[in-house]
Image (tube, rainbow, N blue to C red):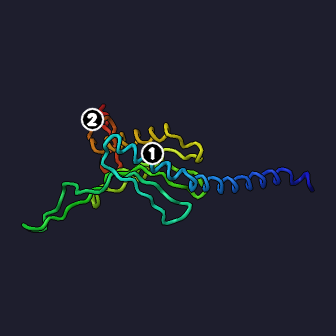
Amino acid sequence: MKNDLFSFSRKVSQYKEVLSQTEAYRQVWKDGLKAKLIKFLEDAIKEVDLDATVEVRNDLQNLEAIVLNLGTVKSGMYQMINQEIERHLIKNNGSLIYQQLFNGKVIVMIQFPYIENYGELKPPKTIAIYRPEELKDPFCVRHLEEFIQDMTNWEDYDDDEPNKKIGFELNFNPTKEE
């Protein structure tokens, strides 16, 4: 019977190792990774004079998130209710998110800007998932660069690129005339 369970035994060992890694990853977050990411992001936005805030979302332990948030503003668009009242559409300017996953790893995501009651909210873009020891400053710099490039592209949207999706994620392809 022992020979029959050899493969199963190896899989159980691997399972136990993964569970143990989860606890270790969570401890790394608590012992300094969280503070290091906060400081890195705060220093970066100060260095380049970016109007943003760094927020910690810690409603759920071991699922915390650090969010570089570009804020919320009036979109500049509004509905005239009457001659004296305007109903402004609110624009959320986007954010870069470092969030713990259930297994202690860290997912890095970009939340795109959106204007409330105008179009649909685009789902977050996942940049990568890291083991805590893999999340080094050069990666964080690349995350910031990708984030600000995506925000710039969103703000500068136009139809100059061929086959760029418009409207509700629909392409209007030219038809061939024969």
Can residue 172 be seen from the camera position used here? no
Can residue 116 be seen from the camera position used here? yes
Q: Are marks 1 and 2 in contact (CB under 8 Å)?
A: no
Query: Closer to the camera, 26 or 105?
Result: 26
User: Badge 2, how many Cα within 10 Å: few under 14, some, many 20+?
Assistant: few
Sequence-wise, the earlier of marks 1 and 2 is 1
Label 1 to label 2, Cα distance in Å? 36 Å
Q: Name the residue: 58% across, 42% down.
A: 134
Q: Which residue is mark 1?
A: 40
Report the disc number at residue 152: none
Left or right: where 92 falls relative to 87: right
Numbered label tally: 2
User: Badge 1, how many Cα within 10 Å: few under 14, some, many 20+?
Assistant: some
Label 2 residue SS? loop
Label 1 residue SS? helix
Q: Name the residue: 35% across, 51% down.
A: 94
Quarter of the image with the C terminus is top left
Quarter of the image with the N terminus is bottom right
Query: Closer to the camera, 95 or 4?
Result: 95
Q: Position of residue 131 (x, y in %)?
A: 59, 47
| Residue 80 lies in quadrant | bottom left
**Which is more foreground, mark 1 or mark 2?**
1
Q: Which residue is mark 2?
A: 160
Q: Name the residue: 70% across, 55% down.
A: 20
Q: Position of residue 84 (x, y in %)?
A: 8, 67
Identify whether 86 is placed above or below 67.
below
Q: Position of residue 133 (x, y in %)?
A: 60, 44
Q: Position of residue 168 (x, y in %)?
A: 33, 52
Q: Residue furthest right?
A: 1
* Amino acid at pointer 1: Phe
* Amino acid at pointer 2: Asp
| Residue 82 lies in quadrant | bottom left
